[in-house]
Amino acid sequence: MITIGGRSGRDLRDLRDGTPIGEWNDWKWQFRHRVRSLSQLASALDRPVASLAPCRPVLRTYPIAITPYYLSLLDLSDENDPLRRQCFPDSRELTFSLGGVPDPLDEERDMPVPGLIHRYPDRCLAIVTGNCAVYCRHCNRKRMWRESKPGRTRERLQSMVDYVARTPALREVIISGGDPLLISEPLLDWFLGALRAIPHVEVLRIGSRAPVTLPMRITPELCAILKRHRPLWFNTQFNHRLEITEEATRACEMLLAAGIPVGNQSVLLKGVNDSYDSMRELLYGLERISVRPYYLFQCDPVQGTDHFRAEIRTGMEIMERLWRNISGLCLPRYVLDCPGGRGKIPLQPFSLLPEKGRK
Ligand SMILES: *Cc1c(COP(=O)(O)O)cnc(C)c1O
Ligand code: SF4
């Protein structure tokens, strides 16, 4: 039996059936063979497509995408599987009980040019694509999944470069999305180089979930490109220890070997990682693979994510217990990105919590 990251390879073997390992390890093959429809999902689950009918309206608003790799990590028979929850459509995505809005952070307001968010004085965030390898159901930019405008990427990126060049206060540019590793390599190389050529840009940062959902995307060629544009930092998003597989570990190691520090931004997700034990296992796992926990985000009140939102109180209790018990290298900062675009604030009032019941 193949074992990946401690998880039984039963499903993986089925999925890989007939797939040569070389193809399985080719990110383009993985990308092309993603689950993109309800019938493909039904066949992965070995269930009649009619049984997934309640999800049909969800897909009209929020499409599905799951790589065979990520699918191979799930326990398909368990509805509460923490990885399955992150990528399977759920009819609750259409119930906006808490009055969620598509863009609670008002990102669109802080865009001096399309796709570039300039909210904090010294850094800005460039959304280079709305595409992702896997569409995470809890995504705070899920409004963008349907908006990819093919063909105009180069012009959009050029106007971002122009804006950064005429804004000397900017010393750091975060390249994000969507997944920035899904634009073509020559385009990514050009964009990073054009930003790097601006004298006041000191640091670049990439935000990508590829090491988790499509780790084969981290190739020696990609690392060679990224290495040329250092200092470059890389933040990814592991949300559960079962995502720390051999493949994901190798992807992070390749980045680290290229001189690129890798950090992690998790989201606190109900039923995925909203317990002390689950969060501790995730953080220990990250420390073991030299990935520094950076942020733990409170899940934003984005439309279609209500069923993922844990109480802030729960998050604070978990953080307080972690703080008391585990290595400082494992501790992320728990933050809330304030609705209305007022920015991130830390949620760490440890001394304010009552003595009683502390563990
Ligand atoms: C989170 C964020 C950043 C980066 O903030 P850091 O605290 O430096 O990680 C930059 N711009 C926007 C719009 C953000 O949401
Ligand atoms: S990879 Fe990031 S941007 Fe893409 S769907 Fe997941 S959370 Fe959203």
Image (tube, grey):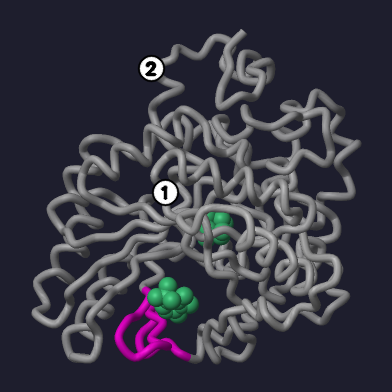
Which residue is drawn at the image coordinates 62% and 8% (left, top)? Answer: 1
Q: Is residue 46 left or right of residue 231?
A: right
Asked whether 241 or 234 is in front, the reply is: 241
* Residue 329 vertical position relative to residue 26 in the rendered view, above or below: below
Q: Position of residue 311 (x, y in %)?
A: 79, 71
Asked whether 298 or 324 is in front, the reply is: 324
Residue underneath mark 2: 22
Residue underneath mark 1: 291
Which residue is drawn at the image coordinates 61% and 91% (left, top)? Answer: 340
Which residue is drawn at the image coordinates 64% and 86% (left, top)? Answer: 339
Q: What is the quadrant of residue 117 in the picture?
A: bottom left
Q: Are the residues tagged 2 and 1 within 8 Å (C-beta)?
A: no
Amino acid on which the number 1 mark rests in the picture: Val
Q: Is residue 56 visible?
A: yes
Q: Position of residue 75 (x, y in %)?
A: 74, 29
Q: Position of residue 226 (x, y in %)?
A: 21, 51
Dot 2, crowdedness within 10 Å: few (<14), some or many (≥20)? few
Residue 35 among those drawn in magenta: no
Element under label 1? loop
Q: Nearer the viewer, mark 2 or mark 1?
A: 1
Q: Which residues are magenta?
A: 110-125
Amino acid on which the number 2 mark rests in the picture: Gly
Q: What is the quadrant of residue 192 in the picture?
A: bottom left
Which residue is drawn at the image coordinates 58% and 53% (left, top)? Answer: 326
| Quadrant of the image where one finds ligand 2 | bottom right
Q: Position of residue 167 (x, y in %)?
A: 22, 91
Q: Which one is earlier in the sequence, the residue at label 2 or at label 1?
A: 2
* Residue 231 vertical position relative to residue 64 in the rendered view, above or below: below
Asked whether 83 or 159 is in front, the reply is: 83
